[in-house]
Image: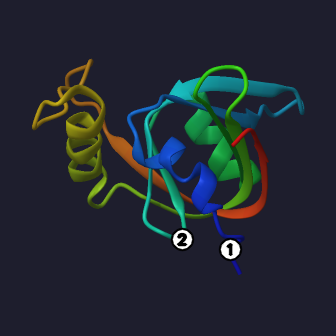
């Protein structure tokens, strides 16, 4: 069962704040990347190109941490399990996130033929700071 996101910090997921996604490399070291994310009321969703290291990390390890901050004194860390990944609807998801983060209606892939993967993360632990 997903741990709820506190109402006090929910805007970190709904506002266009770039998140930092931490995953584990094959040798156990962390990898951290800036990502766009959204929240459906239960799960956090992130999106990555199919051939990226973070994609391989989430598929192999099944865990991810999402960190969002609005300045140094208001932040949230969401540790969770990757419960689903799919290419189906992933580009539509990127279009909706492009609207959220850039105001544009469509996401323009950086590389021709880029395949996107949408990951659904179930929050297992949420740590917050600030009011």
Q: Secondary structure at mark 2?
A: loop
Q: Position of residue 35 (x, y in %)?
A: 49, 31
Q: Position of residue 61 (x, y in %)?
A: 76, 50
Say the numbered circle drawn on residue 42: 2
- In front: 114, or 82? 82
Q: Is residue 110 left or right of residue 106?
A: right
Secondary structure state at the residue bearing disc 1: loop
Circles 1 and 2, Cβ within 8 Å, touching? The answer is yes
Q: Residue at x 48, y 28 (%)?
A: 18
Q: Looking at the rendering, which quadrant does residue 54 occupy? A: top right
Q: Which residue is mark 1?
A: 2
Q: Mark 2 Cα within 10 Å, few/some/many (few <14, many 20+)? A: some
Quadrant where the N terminus sits is: bottom right
Measured as percent of width and height from the top left, residue 87 is found at 35, 55
* Residue at the extreme front of the image, as rendered: 131
Calculate the distance from the C-alpha at mark 1 to the C-alpha at mark 2. Answer: 7 Å
């Amino acid at each position: 069962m997903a741990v709820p996101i506190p109402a006090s910090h929910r805007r970190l997921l709904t506002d266009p704040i770039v998140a930092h996604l931490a995953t584990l490399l094959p040798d156990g070291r962390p990898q951290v990347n800036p990502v766009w994310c959204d929240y459906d009321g239960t799960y956090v969703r992130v999106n990555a190109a199919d051939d990226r290291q973070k994609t391989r990390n989430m598929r192999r390890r099944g865990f991810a941490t999402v960190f969002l901050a609005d300045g140094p004194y208001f932040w949230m860390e969401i540790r969770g399990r990757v419960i689903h990944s799919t290419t189906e609807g992933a580009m539509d998801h990127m279009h909706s996130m492009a609207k959220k983060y850039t105001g544009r209606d469509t996401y323009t892939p950086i590389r021709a033929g880029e395949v996107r993967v949408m990951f659904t993360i179930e929050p297992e632990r949420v740590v917050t700071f600030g009011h």
